[in-house]
Amino acid sequence: MALTAERLGTAVTPSPAFLGATLSAGAVVLFAAADGGIAPTAWRAGTVALAGAAALLALRPTTRRVRANLSFAVPLCGYAALSLISALWSADPSASILDAQRTLLYIAGLAAFLLAGEGLAAGVVVGSVVVGAWALVVRAVDGAPLDSYEGRLLTRPIGYANGLGALMAVGAAVSLALALRARRPLFAAPLAVLVPALALTNSRGSELALAVGCLVAVALSAKRRAVAVLLVAGSATLLAWLLVLPPTGIGDRAAYWSAARATTGAHPLDGTGAGTFGRVHLLAPYARDAHSLYLQVLSELGVGGFVLILAFLAIPLSLAIRRNLAAPAAGLTVFVLHAGIDWDWQIPAVTFSALALVAASVAHRSHAGGLEPSHSGRNET
C-alpha cells in the first residue's frame, strides 16, 4: 500500500522541466497582462512572488547542482547596487531608487530561473505565443483603434508596439531554434502566431534582430559555432556604429542617442544617476528613456554600469554559443540587439524572456536548453 502511494505521489509530481517552463511562461504572460509590467506596483508584487518561488525551488534537493549558477547573477546584483548608490549624486534620487527596485525584480526572477534550470526556453515560447495570440484575438474583436502615438499598430496587451514586437521576435527565434535542433517541424508551429503578430507591430528593429537570431539558430543547429560568433560580433559592431553615427530617417532616436552620448561625455565615470535620462533631457517630455539600453546606462551610471550590464548579457550569450545551445543563443541575440535601439529593459514582460534565456544559457549542460537535444542525441530536458 505504501509503495503504491509512493508511486502515485511520484507520478503526479511535476517534472523539473515543466516547473521551469511554467515559471518562465508565467512571468512573461503575467507581466504582459499588467501593461508590460512598466508600473512600479507590478515590480513590488512580482519581486515578492518570484523571490518566494526562488526560495521554494532552493529547498528542492535536485537544485543543489545548479545553485552554483547563482554566481552568474553577480553582474546584475552589482548593477542594482550601483543604481541604488547613484542616488547619492543623482539628478533625481527618487528615480534612481525606483530604478534599483526594478532591477531587484529582475534579480528575483533570475534567481528563480537559475534554480529551476530546466524548461526555460520552452517556457519563453509558450509565454510569447500566449501574449501573441492574446494580441491577435483582441485585434480581431476590437479592430484597429487609432492611438495618438502608436497609430493602428498592434500594441496590446503590452501597450507598446516595439515592445510587443521584441517579445514576438525573441519567441520566434527560440521556436525556430528548438525546431531545428529537435528536427521536429511541430516545434515551429508557434511561428504561425508569432510571425503575424510581429508583422502587425511593424517593428522593423524587431524584424532585423529576428533575422540575425534566426541565422544564429541555423548556424548552431549545423554546429557552426564560428559562424554564429561572426554573426553576433558583426551585428554588435553594426549596432555600435548605428548608435554613434545614426543615419537619417530613424526618427527621434537620433536625438535621444545624441543626448545620451553628450551626457556620457560630461559624466563618463558616474553618470547622472540611474533612471534620470528623462529628467535630464527635456527635449521630448514623453521620452523618458534613451531608446538604447547601452547608451542609457552609459549616461546614467557611467562606464562601470556599462561594463556590468554588458557582462551580464554577453557572458551568457557567449556560453550559449560555446555550448552550442541554439535556442538560448538565438533568443538572447534578438534581445541584445533590439535592446540597443529601444527601451526593452524598462518593459519587464520583454526582459523576463531574456532573463529566462540567460538562465538557460548558464545552467548545467543537461538542463540548459529546456528541450534541446544534446550532441549524443539524448534530450536535454
Image (cartoon, rainbow, N blue to C red):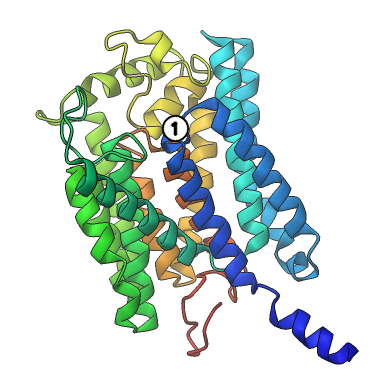
101 with respect to 188 (left or right): right
The single residue placed furthest to the front in the displayed view is 141
Looking at the rendering, in which quadrant would you find the N terminus?
Answer: bottom right
Residue at 40 percent across and 33 percent down: it is 294
Q: 214 and 112: which one is in front?
A: 112
Q: Amino acid at mark 1?
A: Gln
- Examine the rendered structure and indicate whether residue 218 appears above or below residue 183: above
> In x, y percent, where is residue 231?
28, 59
Looking at the rendering, in which quadrant would you find the C terminus?
Answer: bottom right
> In x, y percent, where is residue 302?
49, 24
Secondary element type, mark 1: helix
Q: On the image, numbered disc 1 is attached to which residue?
A: 346
The single residue placed furthest to the left in the displayed view is 249
Residue at 24 percent across and 65 percent down: it is 192
- Examine the rendered structure and indicate whether residue 52 appears above or below residue 220: above
215 with respect to 373 (left or right): left
